[in-house]
Image (cartoon, rainbow, N blue to C red):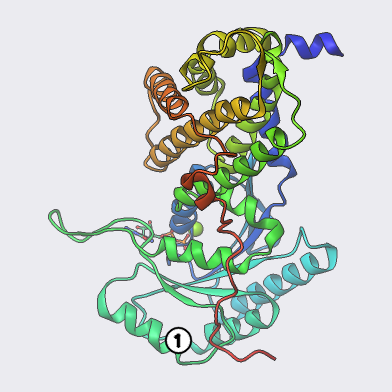
Amino acid sequence: MKNIEKNFTIVEDIINKTETEIKKMKPVNILLVGKTGVGKSTLINQVFRENLAKTGIGRPITKHLRRISKEGIPIVLYDTRGLELNLEVQKEVQKEIFSTISEGKQKNNEEKIHLVYYCINANSSRIEPLELELIKKLSEEVPVLVVLTQSIGEPAKELKTYIENLNLKIYGVINVMAKEFSISEELSIPAFGLKELIGRSFEIIPEEQKKAFNNAQQVDIDRKAKSARSWATKYIATSFGIGFVPIPFSDASVLVPMQVTLLAHITAIFGISMDKATIASLVAAIGGTGGATYAGKYIVSNVIKLIPGVGTIVGGLISGTTASIMTTALALSYIEVMTIIAKGEKEGKYPDLKNIEKLMRDKFEERLKKGKSVSSNNKELSENNLEQQKTKKKWWPWKKK
Ligand SMILES: Nc1nc2c(ncn2[C@@H]2O[C@H](COP(=O)(O)OP(=O)(O)O)[C@@H](O)[C@H]2O)c(=O)[nH]1
Ligand SMILES: [Mg+2]
């Protein structure tokens, strides 16, 4: 067992741990309802990673409902079809929707539908009575957000106000343009509204599913970074705080498994589609290519030199403060690089591996030279300690029962 573990490279270790972390997340289940052509698939592809509607596996679970999922992305989407067809089909669709909802509820918290995006094209001047009835019935069963898709100008805002004034038991009406809309060669409407949709969704979905939702979404990258910083801060404080026994420089490699855990957790929080080569470049940047022992030695000889005040100490021990400074620098620089990768990925851009390695090294060294640690209670970290996910419940437009 020991030998097998030793043969694992750090890179494989990070990848395996990341996958394990993602598997531990409780997937969030979202139902999309709306007529064909309103923009459900476009919305899914813009809001979630990897063009989920296009690249995910869509399994029909009833005649008109498809269950979309993808390995490595902790979300399940239910997509409806046929709501634009004749009355008879619509009734059938409704029946299937409600039986899916109640089946999910009967199973357990993990199978139930956590949220509905009810999509209406914002260019419709009003909602049809049948859709209104469906929204009312749905909101008795599950939290509903009404998404006004392809929102352009005043009419879209008017429809929002109109629906809000109906005093439905819904959690909000949001104007959205999921993808840049081009009117003519010179004129286009940029995408908007997705951040609001994501923000509202975070307020609604259960605490247990928030990590998964944050991983799956690609709209608010800074939220991923904040959550990662918050997690890393706590992990570092716990690992190197009171009770940490200083370790001899020659045993610096014992820090490596902790660093692997740290990087894996951060990668899982972000949920970016990273391959082995990218992780390898990032690890190479901090000197980890040759396994734990090599990384341990690298830390002793190169990393410690960079920390102000510490590099001058000859021999002796790595204190909790020193370990904390190194690990904080590692976490924060990794989060910075992840942020850049995730923002690029959203635009369909993938970074050059050489650039990634250099960026990671520069950021890491820059942070080491600052010599800050969690225990030094610097402003940057303490600010991020405020876990943004514990948002207060908002005021909803209906009265509490
Ligand atoms: N530019 C732009 N086009 C959109 C948007 N939403 C929908 N569309 C257009 O509407 C068509 C149908 O959208 P789709 O997402 O397939 O609708 P669905 O049937 O509800 O899944 C797309 O092919 C787009 O041309 C949007 O946010 N921006
Ligand atoms: Mg579709």
Residue at x 62%, y 62% (from the top left corner): 30
Mark 1, residue position:
163
The percent position of residue 321, horizontal first and vertical second, equals 61, 30
In the image, is residue 305 above or below residue 379?
above
Residue found farthest to the left: 186
Q: Residue at x 53, y 42 (%)?
A: 55
The percent coordinates of residue 282 (x first, y second) are 50, 22
Left or right: residue 148 compared with residue 151: right
Q: Determine whether the residue tagged by mark 1 lies in a helix, strand or loop.
A: helix
Q: Which of the 4 image quarters holds residue 342?
A: top left
Choose between 308 and 269: the one closer to the eye. 308
Above or below, 335 against 148 in this view is above
Seen from the viewer's position, the closer of residues 197 and 297 is 297
Q: Residues within 10 Å of mark 1 (few under 14, many from 20)?
A: some
Q: Residue at x 58, y 56 (%)?
A: 387
The residue depicted at 39 percent of the width and 19 percent of the height is 358
Percent across and percent down for residue 345 are: 42, 38
Residue 329: in sight, yes or no? yes
Q: Quadrant of the C terminus?
A: bottom right
> Is residue 340 left or right of 118 when viewed as pictured?
left
Tell me the kind of residue under disc 1.
Answer: Ile
Image: 111 above or below 225: below
